[in-house]
Image (cartoon, grey):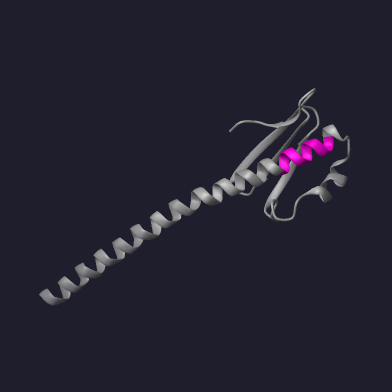
């Protein structure tokens, strides 16, 4: 019986160590995923804001201006004409807003 208990205890520690290693890997990768999502959201918001409020184009014509690699399929753009602002969002990860300022163009709001 003691041999079985010792083996189970060893396996328990092995699984706990593996779990901690996996958790550390996820925390490390999450920061990279979040940074890329934030960059994509800010890029989409600023480019669309410039297209809408600096160039004066419609949202439909601005959709074709997105860089293929920056705005993935899980990204979305929302326009707020009353505040002259555009918000770019990457699903469940990041959201950034760019606002039109006369004389300055479109600026991304700080986080």
Query: How many marks do you count on the picture?
Result: 0
- The percent coordinates of residue 95 (x first, y second) are 63, 41
Task: Name the residue at the front extreme.
Answer: 104
Question: Relative to residue 26, is residue 36 drawn left or right?
Answer: right
The relative height of residue 74 versus residue 59 in the rendered view (above or below) is below
Question: Relative to residue 13, is residue 23 drawn left or right?
Answer: right
**Quadrant showing the N terminus:** bottom left
Residue at image position (61%, 48%) is 37
The secondary structure making up most of the magenta span is: helix
- The percent coordinates of residue 86 (x first, y second) are 74, 36
Quarter of the figure with residue 14: bottom left
Quarter of the figure with residue 103: top right
Q: Is residue 49 magenta?
A: yes
Question: Relative to residue 32, is residue 62 drawn left or right?
Answer: right
Considering depth in this image, is 44 or 2 the residue closer to the camera?
44
Task: Name the residue at the left extreme.
Answer: 2
Segment tinted magenta in the rendering: 44-52
The relative height of residue 25 versus residue 31 in the rendered view (above or below) is below
Residue at image position (67%, 53%) is 74
Residue at image position (58%, 33%) is 111
Residue at image position (25%, 70%) is 11
- The percent coordinates of residue 38 (x first, y second) are 61, 43
Q: Is residue 47 magenta?
A: yes
């Amino acid at each position: 019986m003691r041999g079985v208990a010792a083996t189970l205890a060893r396996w328990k520690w092995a699984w706990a160590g593996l779990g901690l290693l996996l958790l550390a890997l996820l925390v490390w990768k999450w920061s990279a995923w979040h940074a890329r999502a934030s960059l994509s959201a800010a890029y989409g918001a600023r480019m669309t804001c410039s297209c809408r409020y600096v160039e004066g184009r419609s949202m439909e014509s601005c959709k074709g201006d997105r860089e293929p690699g920056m705005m993935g399929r899980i990204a979305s753009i929302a326009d707020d004409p009353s505040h002259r602002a555009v918000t770019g969002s990457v699903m469940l990860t990041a959201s950034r807003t760019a606002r039109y300022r006369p004389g300055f163009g479109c600026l991304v709001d700080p986080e």
